[in-house]
Image (cartoon, rainbow, N blue to C red):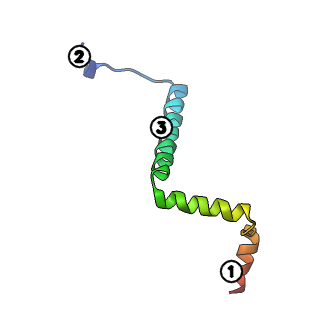
Amino acid sequence: MHPSNEIFALDKESIEIIKKTKELLDELIETIDILGDEKAMKKIEEAEKDEKEGRVRDFDEFLNEIDEL
């Protein structure tokens, strides 16, 4: 029989494994894209430096500032 005429079935566990694998591959591709984007990496480095040096604020504090505008 020619391979394109073959029929096979997957159980639910196999389907879930395939879905999870796809999700992980999508995440990996996104990570590689970001790592290859010099502008994005520079922004990440700046954000990490800001956090390390305490130039950040709590999210709730940020929301309160917006409400005051």
Residue underneath mark 1: 66
- Residues at circles 3 and 1 in contact by the CB criterion of under 8 Å: no
Q: Is residue 18 above or below residue 54?
A: above
Residue underneath mark 2: 2
Q: Is residue 50 above or below residue 37?
A: below
Residue placed farthest to the left in the image? 2
Q: Which mark is residue 22?
A: 3
* Residue toward you, 53 or 44: 53
- Describe the element under mark 1 as helix, strand or loop: helix
Identify the residue at horizontal 71%, vertical 82% (top origin): 67
Q: Residues within 10 Å of mark 3 (few under 14, many from 20)?
A: few
Amino acid at the residue labelled 3: Lys
Identify the residue at horizontal 51%, vertical 26% (top origin): 14
Q: Is residue 60 above or below residue 33?
A: below
Which quarter of the picture shows residue 44? bottom right
- Residues at circles 1 and 2 in contact by the CB criterion of under 8 Å: no
Q: Residue 24: x and y, percent?
A: 52, 39
Check the picture and name the quadrant holding the C terminus. Answer: bottom right
- Residues at circles 2 and 3 in contact by the CB criterion of under 8 Å: no
Q: Residue 6: x and y, percent?
A: 30, 19
Which quarter of the picture shows residue 43? bottom right
Check the picture and name the quadrant holding the N terminus. Answer: top left
